[in-house]
Amino acid sequence: MKILITGTAGFIGYHLTQKLLKRGDTVVGIDSINDYYDVNLKHARLQDAGIKVSDIVYNKPVVSTSYPNYTFVKLDITDKENLEQQFRDHKFDAVCNLAAQAGVRYSLTNPEVYIDSNIKGFLNILECCRHFSIDHLVYASSSSVYGLNKKMPFSEHEIADHPVSLYAASKKANEMMAHTYSHLFNLRTTGLRFFTVYGPWGRPDMALFIFTKAILEGKPIQVFNNGNMLRDFTYVDDIVNGIIHTIDQPAERNYLWNAQNPDPATSSAPFRVFNIGRGAPVNLLDFVTEIEKQVNKKAIKTLMPMQDGDVAETCADVSNLDEMLGYKPEVSVPTGVERFIAWYKTYYNIQPEPVLVH
């Protein structure tokens, strides 16, 4: 297939792009390469996929030196005119929209950028998919849409209408916007609610990255809600496998959908929403212990109260994705943490501490 991936310089976008290229798909990747976090890390991901960073100019295609079937374009999805041109030029079979302003805490102080990227930008994606007859749009939602919900595990079949951050609200809005386009224009859409993704090439604002960096540097880490947090940590390869399962099997109408008892996960339109997680939450302090084991160094913990916009527990019910598309997470947390730390030490050239011989 010919697939557009937005956010291709991002954490999940980088891994998804590599996997699709290796199986032989043609990928056009776009990314604004904004400075929400270290631009050098984004450039390094692109370089690892054969994109020469010195050749990157806004809205100009750069063909990978490693994969002739990969073209990268620096482009912001809020730039409707140039985004439309990409759709016009390439005639994509499918679109995977991973471009978004991420982060719950950042949304408390910078709300406008979430409206620009996650609402206006997503509207541009929907409009392009509509006008250029895209067969299937897959887009990133988030476990954060469950907000105040307490019934565990979180199920797509339960209503999720009480977000506790603007980031979560923007992701819920994406799902509602997608449903509207599925209903009005027969656009097949699939929303994927990611649960705490981690792994090599991960984002520096995520817990595993923050904790690993601080522990290795002998600095204290902040553990929120006094450590009473449960997170459904999901390794990036499992997330990517779920995305690819979804791309390959486009959304269909649910002809059994009942308007008297509506299922939020499906519709009479070609729309659906899936959780992608492990379905096995881990206590945050146990997660820290796993990092300590892998780096052979104790963390200096500072216990903190719960932060605004955060939730105490997440756990994905992934039975829907398993039953419909055959998704099964495979990577355990110890294995995933080990792989991340191995990458981190290599990427930042951290040498093992010398062993003193007496």
Image: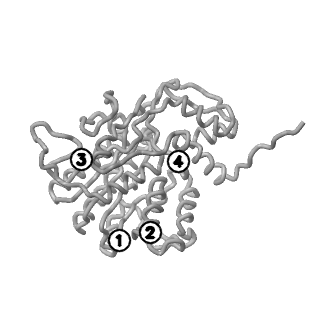
Cβ–Cβ under 8 Å for marks 1 and 2: yes
The residues bearing labels 3 and 1 have C-alpha atoms spaced at a distance of: 25 Å
Q: Looking at the image, is mark 2 or mark 3 earlier in the sequence?
A: 2
Q: Looking at the image, is mark 3 or mark 4 earlier in the sequence?
A: 3
Q: The residue under label 2 is which amino acid type?
A: Val
Does 279 sit above or below residue 113? above
Left or right placement of residue 158 versus residue 78 in this view: left
Dot 4 falls on a residue whose secondary structure is: loop
Dot 3 falls on a residue whose secondary structure is: helix
Q: Could you classify mark 3 by the number of other residues whose Cα lies within 10 Å: few (under 14), some (14-19), or many (20 or more)?
A: few
Q: Looking at the image, is mark 2 or mark 4 earlier in the sequence?
A: 2
The residue carrying mark 4 is: 199
Left or right placement of residue 28 versus residue 286 in this view: left
The residue carrying mark 2 is: 73
Q: Looking at the image, is mark 4 or mark 1 earlier in the sequence?
A: 1
The residues bearing labels 2 and 3 have C-alpha atoms spaced at a distance of: 28 Å
The residue carrying mark 3 is: 176
The mark closer to the camera, 4 or 1, is: 4
Image quarter of the N terminus:
bottom left
Q: Residue 102 location, x and y as percent?
A: 43, 47
Does 284 sit above or below residue 268? above
The residues bearing labels 4 and 1 have C-alpha atoms spaced at a distance of: 31 Å
Determine which of the numbered discs, if any, sits on residue 86 in the image: 1
Q: The residue under label 4 is which amino acid type?
A: Gly
Cβ–Cβ under 8 Å for marks 3 and 1: no
Q: Residue 171 location, x and y as percent?
A: 33, 45
The answer to which image quadrant residue 216 occupies is top right
Residue farthest to the right, as pictured: 358
